[in-house]
Amino acid sequence: MIELIKAPWPWYVAGPLITLTMVTLILTGKRFGLSSNFRTLCAIAGAGRASEYFRFDWKSDIWNLMFVGGGALGGFLAMNFLGGDQAVNLSEETLSYLENRGILSAGEAYQPAELFSFGADGFTPWLFTILGGFLVGFGTRYAGGCTSGHAISGLSNLQLPSLIAVIGFFIGGLTFTWFILPEILN
C-alpha cells in the first residue's frame, strides 16, 4: 500500500481530478491562482489602509490560502515521509553535459547541490533565489496572474489573455533553458 502512495499518479487519474476541481470552481464562481494569495495576505495584514487595490473581502478568498497551506504541507509530507531524496533518472548524455559544466551531483539527488545548496557556493543559490523571485513576482503582476492561474483557470474559461500568457511562459522557459542557463553554467 505504501508503494502505491509513493508512486506518481498517472495522468489519467491526476488530469480528471484537476478537471473536477476546475469545474467545481467555475460552478461556484471562484478563480484559481496562487499569486492572488499575496494580495489576500497583504489585505489581511492591513495593506488596504495604504492602497485601494488591497481593499476587498479577503475572507471570501480564505479557501485559496488553505489550498496553498495544504500544498506546502503535502509537499513536506511527501518529501520527508513518502519520497525521500530520490534522484531523477537522467540519460548518460545529459549527465555528461552537466558534468562538463561543473554540476557533478546531477543524477545523485533530486536537486543538484551545485545549484540549490546554500552551503555550496554561497552566492549562486542566493542569486538564483532572489533574481528568480523578483522575475516571478514581476511577471505575475505584469501578466495579471501566475502560471497556475492562467494555465489551469484561465484556459478552462477560454480566456485569450491566458492563452497568450501561457504561450509566453513556454517561450520564456525554453529560452532560459536552452540559451541563458547554459551561459550561466559556463
Image (cartoon, rainbow, N blue to C red):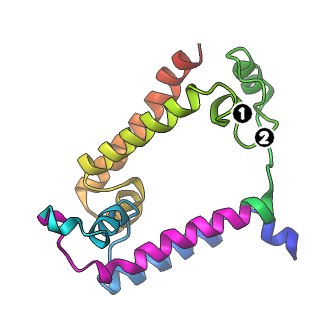
Answer few, some or many: residues within 10 Å of disc 2's Cα (few below 14, many 20 plus, some between 14 and 19): some
**Residue 64: within the magenta?**
yes
Tag 1–tag 2 contact (CB < 8 Å): yes
Percent of width and height locating residue 151: 39, 57
Residue 136, above or below 10? above
What label does residue 109 carry, if any?
A: 2
Residue type marked 1: Ala
User: Percent position (x, y) of residue 86?
Assistant: 80, 49
Which one is in front in this view, the residue at disc 1 or the one at disc 2?
Answer: 1
Q: Is residue 67 above or below residue 72?
A: below
3D distance between C-alphas at marks 1 and 2: 8 Å
What are the residue bounds of the magenta stretch? 52-78
Mark yes or no: residue 136 visible: yes
Magenta span: chief secondary structure: helix
Task: Residue 102 in the image: state x and y as whole percent.
Answer: 70, 18
Q: Residue at x 26, y 50 (%)?
A: 141
Q: Nearer the viewer, residue 11 or 4?
A: 4
Residue drawn at (36%, 68%) of the image: 156
Q: SS class of the residue under badge 1?
A: helix
178 sits left or right of 62 in the view = right
